[in-house]
Amino acid sequence: MAAKVFTPNPIYSPFLITDKTPQQKHNLGHFYLSKNTSKRRRVVSSSIMAPPIPSSPLAPPSSSLLAPLSRSPAATLPLSRVWREIQGSNNWDNLIEPLSPILQQEITRYGNLLSASYKGFDLNPDSKRYLNCKYGKKSLLKESGIHDPDGYQVTKYIYATSDININPIQNEPNRARWIGYVAVSSDNSVKRLGRRDIVVTFRGTVTNPEWLANLMSSLTPARLDPHNPRPDVKVESGFLSLYTSGESESTFGLESCREQLLSEISRLMNKHKGEEMSITLAGHSMGSSLAQLLAYDIAELGMNQRRGERAVPVTVFSFAGPRVGNLGFKDRCEELGVKVLRITNINDPITKLPGFLFNENFRALGGVYELPWSCSCYTHVGVELTLDFFDVQNISCVHDLETYINLVNRPRSSKSAVNEDNFGGEFLNRTSEMMFGKGQRRALQLRNTATKAAYLLSSVSNHLLYYNIF
């Protein structure tokens, strides 16, 4: 399915700014907001005046969210009645453009739950909980600023270990790092949500082994189903390593991230047997890759199938996620009914990796004939909801989770708001169309993307050095 460039519209935003509404300014410099047109994209440049994140991100939708704003029933009915559509049962048809207010709220809600995986991560080398969670399971959501902590109960912390040895000379075993958590909706929230929701969140890359895992761009067969290895289903080897490796060097070492997750999800499904249920996985950056691997794993093993009942929906909300596997992986996920909603920024280079050149856009000739190397090309999975923002003074913001969440809820700037910067951006777009051929414009786009990637990696390296992670 083609990507949809989304510009939040005030009419559909649950957080309308009026003269009486306090505004929270985000210093993100120039903000580029794209407009869907068949020929070109109008560039609007302005400072961001984003509304604050809602005070109760887990609260039920207000009556204003349920106004008849779309032809889709999911935009006019309460969440408890349309939760399957919001989870992607119809591939989010008529819910993205324009963005359904309930879907907008759910993206924000899962984004806030995901942010706890960052806020709870202890990066203080002098702390006893270094590279682990700073808080206990009962207090994590509250300490992370989730204003309705009773909506979900955290049931398990998840740890991941890479089999990449940072210092092969010393041959020290790699330690497991806290990567996220499993939670389940409380009895009080089941009625509001319409089902029992099992949530798994995965933070993005922070430690050095995780960055090395990201840079391992070779495809390898997933082979997660022992009864049917499916060698044509291939995924990025570094992500697979993080997902399947455990602390094997230690007698009392942790199980792999995969074993921890499958065990806990199976336990929760058995505990709530007979209830309406959903499995929702939320990840940012590298974490979205682990979320997609887990979603595929659950569906491939048939864990979401229940005898005599409908299958439990498995949905991934991916924020700034890279590609995970090849065409075989994509096709198998779709065959198994795994739903993935990718929230991306077109200026975020991480979403274009791995497979910067050899990807879904390169595997077919004229969009019709499959080329011999198509099975070795990386391919995105799912439906894309695309934002467009960039700040030359703060390159890392193009990949920041909080920026993604804020921008999903940002009302669109007035069409009449045109200043010198706007005119300059529009002028440059038109000039490039007149002066350069399609191939040359594509080369310029690739160069610009590569430049942004270099700036972002430089920013990340400085961040890691600051925290003495290298």
Image: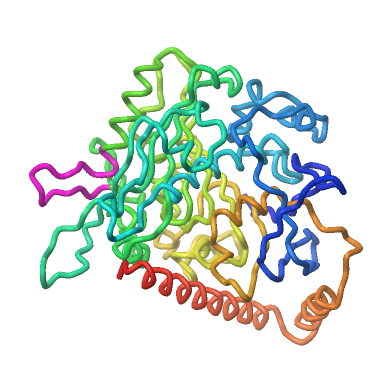
Q: Is residue 464 above or below residue 441?
A: above
- The residue nearer to you, when weighing 137 against 96, is 137
* Residue 107 at x, y percent in the picture: 60, 42
178 relative to 443 in the view: left or right: left
Instruction: Give the residue displayed 85% in from the left and 47% down from the top.
Output: 18
Instruction: Give the residue displayed 40% in from the left and 17% down from the top.
Output: 272
Q: Main secondary structure of the magenta part?
A: loop
In magenta, the rendered stretch is: 244-259
When asked about the image quadrant of residue 368, the answer is: bottom right
Instruction: Give the residue displayed 48% in from the left and 43% down from the top.
Output: 144
Check the image and name the residue furthest to the front: 126
39 relative to 445 in the view: left or right: right
When asked about the image quadrant of residue 267, the answer is: top left
Whether residue 257 appears in magenta in the rendering, the answer is: yes
Whether residue 394 appears in magenta in the rendering, the answer is: no
* Residue 419 at x, y percent in the picture: 87, 73
Q: Is residue 273 above or below residue 112?
A: above
Check the image and name the residue furthest to the bottom: 435
When asked about the image quadrant of residue 214, the answer is: bottom left
- The residue nearer to you, when weighing 36 against 250, is 250
Instruction: Give the residue displayed 46% in from the left and 31% down from the top.
Output: 279
Locate the C terminus by quadrant. Answer: bottom left
